[in-house]
Amino acid sequence: MPDVADFIRKLQRRRIEGSHATARQTAELLRSVVSQTRMPYTNQAAALLDSVRAVGEQLIAANPVELAVGNIVRRVLHIIREEDLSSSAVSFEGLMISEKSDDEEDVDQKGGPVLSAAAVAAAARSTLRPRSLQTLLEDGPTPAVPSKSSSAGDSEGKSKSDKSTMGKRLKHSVIEAINLLIEEIDDCYEDISEQAVEHIHQNEVILTLGRSKTVKEFLYAAKQKNRSFRVFVAEGAPRYQGHVLAKELIQKGLETTVITDSAIFAMISRVNMVIVGAHAIMANGGVIAPVGMNMLALAAQRHAVPFVVVAGSHKLCPLYPHNPEVLLNELKSPSELIDFGEFSDCMDFGAHGGAPLMHVVNPTFDYVPPNLISLFITDTGGHNAAHMYKLIADYYSADDLVIKRKSTSSN
Amino acid sequence: MAQKKGGKSAASDDPEELARTPLQAVLLADTFNLKFRPITLERPKVLLPLVNTPMIDYTLAWLESVGVEEVFLFCCAHAEQVKEYIGNSHWGQSHAGFSITTIESNFSMSAGDALRFIEGKNVIRGDFILITGDTISNMSLTEALQAHKDRRKKDPDTVMTMFVKRSKPMPLTHQTRLGNDEIMMAIDPETKQLLYYEDRFDSSKRAVTLDKSLLADNASLYLRTDLEDCYIDICSPEVLTIFLDNFDYQHLRRHFVKGLLHDDIMGKKIYTHEIDSSYTARVDNYRSYDTISKDIIQRWSFPLVPDVLYAGNRAQMRLQREGIYKAPDVTLSPSVRIGAFTAIGSATIIGENSSVSNSVIGELCTIGRNVSIDGCYIWDNVTIEDGCRLSHSIVCDGVHLHAGATLEPGVILSFKVEVGQNITVPAYSKVSLLPQPSKQDSDEELEYADTNSGVIDSPSIASISPANIEHDHVSSFDTEQSVLLEGGLSGVGYIWTSCETGNEEEWRYSVAPIPEEKLKEFYAKMFDEDESSSDGEQTGITHSGELISESKSTDFDDSDGEYKGDVAKFEKEVEETFERALGGVAEENVQLEINSLRMSFNVTHAECAGAVFQSVIKSAIITSNSSKSNLLKATIDAIERSKGLLSYFITNVDEEIEVILKFEEMCMEITREFAPIFSSVLHQLYDKEVITEDAILKWESEKADADESDKVFVKQSEAFLKWLKEAPEEDDEDE
């Protein structure tokens, strides 16, 4: 598949950057992979899982530091599992109903409405994922999941049709679900920024570091709701994306102050809330974010300023930061820090026995431990750091955490 | 992708270029020099690994990243190997970012020939990028390409945009960190037009000769020595035709660039584009191989770094702390010490108590126990047995070092060489399985071994090595000692004599750092130069200063005055030396001292002779009281005493005349006591054979036209002169 090779190359050469773009493109690519997969007669879900996993492994290897790729691959795998379960549940339930319809008549009448196929599917889904607080709450009062019920409802009628159409249906429903995922990725900014007014209050001072599109939208949304507040932007050396953000904010009429990263500690006492974006949220509630963020988080903790991370759900990574697969950081070119020409004589390997005395290190990310983070705002609402693993359990299935064809082929 | 789109939209704005030609690149996969011999006898330079990835991969990856759509790969030496590599790699496949076409010519000896050959193929349709296959870069091309196109629109005579990068040369050795010589460029500060290019500029002379018109035609210009030529050019198609017209152009810079700059008739213009933050460098010699490898490990070339750019089949290296790159399947004994900035390739095994620092180790290597490796480049499949010591060397594929072998700094071991037990390979030696071509033939620009050398017919190692072993055991090759075999164990390989540069210059381009002693030597030399010519600084050029063409007339006066002062100073020095000599220093030592004084003050032989004579005469005054006869006697004694010295410094007629004139001057000014006895002293000098008859007569004839006041001494010695003139006649009569 040429698309895959092309995308892998782009990832490798770091030509796609930013988790949002990467996530979206990964989802699109996987959708085309799913649609191109030939479906066998038996065990169709396994075939889909295998092909997605095969591509996913390559994608993750192409740019291991971009965790969004792995997240989306796992999300898609999870989608396939879910759809498989629900469709098999539907067919099973369909058979049950047709055979035992006369016997169960009275039961139906007694127990209220018939358990719809969708409800069974939801139940099956809840067995698939570990029991989390949220699923318990969801499943208790409303047994049917409304979003899925329509598709499951249609399928009920055709449940007895032959297996090839069923295969198509599985594929079809997986593609549908991936489309929903893409939509979700696209809409994450809106969903997050809807919550802005609940968090940003009148005359507050907000501090942010670097440039995050999520933060920008969040602040815009608050501004649109006529909240008046001030924003401090730490410039985010060495890329100085903070300068860009400041420009964008000013165009929207937000009062903005640019400070250096090193002035954060001096300014933090005047700040009411720190709102930052993230590169990835790990399963333990820790955050991988642009360099300098840990310093900011520590400063916020010292002055008891709330440290809020806004991030779309595609940044939720089911791995822990200590997992060996996780590449936490990437060292970029030192030329972002210093001018090569100016320092070229300090880096002459001809002298000093071949080892220059000057080294320049330019890490991209920081790891912020969960205890420093007051609140996560994702597209599903606000969460505590300690709650992250449960949220993650809703999106991913435990079997997919390690994506290696060989090790998981036995599944 | 973004760049590509940018290029497209920019082109569509321009009505002339609606029929857009794809961006093309000519990649020369042959460097047409011998700097990487003997390695390049067996493998083309572009396929040599640079931090475990062939150089050409870096170049192709860059071309792809800047949105090049068609690449013409020109191969000459080892064309088959290059083609095979490209065919097997992902570059040759359809989903690569560009199409790649190989052009093969076995008869091209230079970049000029290659470009003429490509011209003949008629494939270049528009502006193209000219690059060699050993260039590492991560710069963006969009801006420079646009600038080039804009200039082309304004002035169709623009043929080329050259990329330059700021890089300070080392003040001591006058070479850049890549081991290249300093380059002197004159650039128009406004338009960035290149006005002057000299790649063999010697800044130690502190002077540069520029064409007068250069200063006349340009209001201002920058003379810079802190630039490095990246050897990446954006060329217009005219470049090819220029090469075709000037069939003697071989070298891109030495012939083409200089040729265009000197040639006013064609009026072609070359511009420069200075790169700021991004990285560009070319592997031109072993020193740059070392430097660039280290730059890559320190990630200057990001994203072309080992943990990102890797196309091999084996496990990819991952970056760990302290700049250590390690593949996941490396086997290290727990006691191995890995220093900072080291890369270790896949499936390599390192034994107990070994230490590795500042080095790159390839794939599938086996390294034994107690081995120390510092600053080395070890390629694939190398076996190093226990107790070896390697420092600052390049070890190619398949080399086997037996236990206890030592590689001194700067050693190059070519493919499959074996070094016997406990043998030390001396510094800067190059060892290859292939014997060195006996003599450098005229077409030395070829990268591969020429069949003319008569030693080998094919570069296949398998067929040769058994013969070599036998040959080596019998006798050593040529005049070279077979150091490898002294241990009597299985060493295989020839030691090459350094051919081009000579041993003296070997350290300059070696993979090893410059030895301390050399640096000290240079430091001392520079210090001396500064001492003696610190006044001459006004001609020196600051690193990027603007040269101001005024204030020249005053300079000359200054230097003239300086000059006179120097001579007086010199005379004083000589006098002091002479006084010390009277204290009983051996005559040779005095000679030596005065000679060295003469050289350091840069005075002529004649002036020196005069100074010595003056010292001799002055010594006479010191030892005598003022009576006339005593003075004469003392003078004669002094002359007698220093006769050897005088005759050493006074060797020809001119110097003798100088001595007489000096004496005359002394008599009139400093030491008037001598005035009465001038003729007697002159006679004495003649008698002692310090001054010959010719000189005296010449002196007289010179004085013939002088003022009356100047003739005092001539008149005084009239009798002596008369006698002199008669004397030869007597001689004649005698015969």
Image (tube, rainbow, N blue to C red):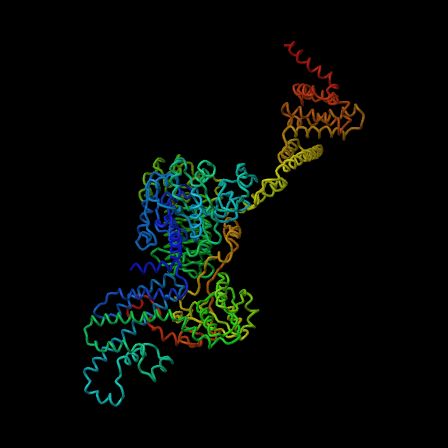
Residue B284's x, y, as percent? 44, 45
Residue B496's x, y, as percent? 42, 40
Which quadrant of the figure contains the N terminus of chain B?
bottom left
Which quadrant of the figure contains the C terminus of chain B?
top right
Nearest the viewer among B622 and B571 is B571
Nearest the viewer among B24 and B723 is B24
Say whether residue B93 is left or right of residue B36. left
* Above-or-below relation of A251 to A153: above
Residue with the most extreme front position? B15
What is the count of numbered marks? 0
Residue B413's x, y, as percent? 41, 46
The reply to whether residue B316 is visible in this rendering is: yes
Q: Quadrant of residue B478?
A: top left
* Above-or-below relation of A80 to A13: below
Say whether residue A346 is left or right of residue B684. left
Say whether residue B545 is left or right of residue B233. right
Q: Quadrant of residue A84?
A: bottom left
Q: Quadrant of residue B499?
A: top left
The reply to whether residue B418 is visible in this rendering is: no
Residue A377's x, y, as percent? 44, 74
Nearest the viewer among B259 and B622 is B259
